Amino acid sequence: MVRPRRRHQHRRSCPRHHLTPRGQGTEVSDNTSVPPSDLSPSEEYGQRLQARKRQVAHFENLHLRCGNLRLLTVVATLLAAWFSLHNDAFSLWWLFIGLAAFLAIAVIHAKVLRHRACAARAVDFYRKGLARIEDRWAGTGQTDTRSNLPDHQASLYATDLDLFGPGSLFELLSQARTRIGEDTLAHWLLSPSPLAEIKERHVAVSELRPCLDLREDIAVLGEAREGADDLKVGLHPEALTQWAEAPNRLKHHFLRWLALALSLLSIASVILWAERGEKIPFFLLLAAASILTASLHKQTAEVLHSTGHALKDLRLLASLLSRLEREHFESPRLHSLRQQLSSHHLPASQAIARLRTIGDYIDALDSPILRALNVSLLYSVQVAYAAESWRSAHGTAVRSWLAATGEAEALLSLSAYSYEHPADPFPEFIEGPPCLIAEQLGHPLIPSAKCVRNSVSLCGETRVLLISGSNMSGKSTLMRAVGINTVLAMAGAPVRAQRMQLTPLQIGASILINDSLQEGSSRFYAEITRLHHICTLAEKNPPVLFLLDELLQGTNSKDRLIGAEGVVNALLESGAIGLISTHDLALTNIGEQRDPRLHNVHLQDEIVDGKMKFDFKLQDGVVTKSNGIELMRLIGLKV
């Protein structure tokens, strides 16, 4: 796709098809480093969006012209043939010339349609980018639900922090084209990464941040068929990996060459039959081919079936790998990923392209003509041996290729988020006891215009913040903001804060707890079960950051106070830190007066002109008033 040249483009995006980055500001560090540019991300996206729209209009115009030319070619050819026929000078050359012209225009037309489809995809790519920058992104991205989360650490916070589903963190972040890319990003969000890997991702994301051309190229990859929706790769990584690592079923490799020899001899026998009328050689060879086909039928059928299922949608994967292989990377992690994309000195893209060709051969067996010629040409036997040969040569590398592809896509997703939110820094990891300090922390899923930021400190003597406040004052939102930014930090992504320092942490949350009619459990039972899982998790490394909203609200005040104090003590003894919210002021008594490791803070409200007003700002101390009665009176209850 042709791109218009613009001044300073090399400063804002990685050069295309160059061996080394030319731009300035590509230095990487543990903190945010936005490349110098005369345009903001929204301005850059806006200019590129308009340029791609002009390309769509240009190729649409060419599409109409090609359509008209094809029609004119047919009409002109028929008219020329008619005139020559009536002038007794009819010649087949008119038909040949017309057919050649028609085919040439058809080839050009197909190319124009591909360019138009790619330009349209680029328009969609930049529209979605602007929507993310302008906080209009909810419902426009990938909404992986991850509905079947296992009952382990991931289920202790994924739903509570809106990691998946519509309007989720995953939808905001993910730009993956393959399932393996989605899975890799989801894994990073669901499991805290080792500190060494996090720091490597910081460097890689910093290098990828200005690479707009790379992200755009990957976004528009695909067949680009007219009217086809192939923006998503339907690749089945598990099936492909299992097939690649499975043992071969066809053991005797000399039979492959025997099958090839018999098929060539069969073709020669057909020619001999046509020229000299000799039938016997053909039928003898056909009998031999039938015997060989029958003897290998079971193994061949198994190979073709398993291979055909595993080799779906490889064309786009090959294109994606090829695009990644053309990039030159400086950061150690990206350089290592690029080195993974090879097998026996053959680039992964070429190996996958060969495998895709084998898959096309298998699909061709559905043709009635090939079915009729299958036995005489030993077509299925040769294709099965070709698939087995590929597996022997490259099968052990497939898992590595897919892992590298998934990680590259996840890093590209994080780099896009970093580019589109230049004010969000990378967190700073520190050593020592469990600690989290965040200045001007905000929730990344809340639009910037509505997001109220707070500073939070869990460090030194303060191990727990006990947040009191009235209904709707923002206690749960604050806890989610702390939790989701910790998820981002432990995934290697930038965070929504002015500054954030923390030690490695894992999250245990009890925010969205509901009863279950299917399991016959009450909300209280579901909550204490979750608390048990969190306490068990706190015995492991890294230390736990617990987020407990309205702790033990499903029981009476006496049991609640005793239970809350016991749970908090157990977590603190395990080395955990965290936040606990409540609107029951009795629970605030377990704060500084009983344990200096607990610090009371609150969120306040006030009634102005008969309406409840909240500033959502965190303040020291215990809340001084409750709004329950006021809320009941405001809606008309006589209390």
Image: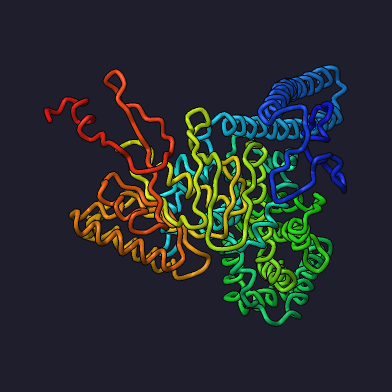
Residue at image position (78%, 34%) is 36
In this rendering, is residue 610 above or below 161? above
Quarter placement of the N terminus:
top right
Left or right side of 635 for 89: right
Residue at x-position 65% and y-position 77%: 248
The answer to whether 376 appears left or right of 233 in the picture is right
> Residue sitting at 82 percent across and 20 percent down?
80
> Percent x, y for residue 415?
67, 45
At horizontal 53% and vertical 57% (from top left) the residue drawn is 435
Residue 360 seen in the figure: no
Q: Quadrant of the C terminus?
A: top left
Q: Nearer the viewer, residue 297 or 598?
A: 598
Image spot of residue 323 (x, y percent): 76, 48
Report the front residue among 146 and 597.
597
Q: Quadrant of residue 605?
A: top left
Q: Is residue 582 above or below residue 572?
A: above
Up the image or down, 181 lies above or below 538; here it is: above
Asked if residue 57 shows in the view, the reply is yes
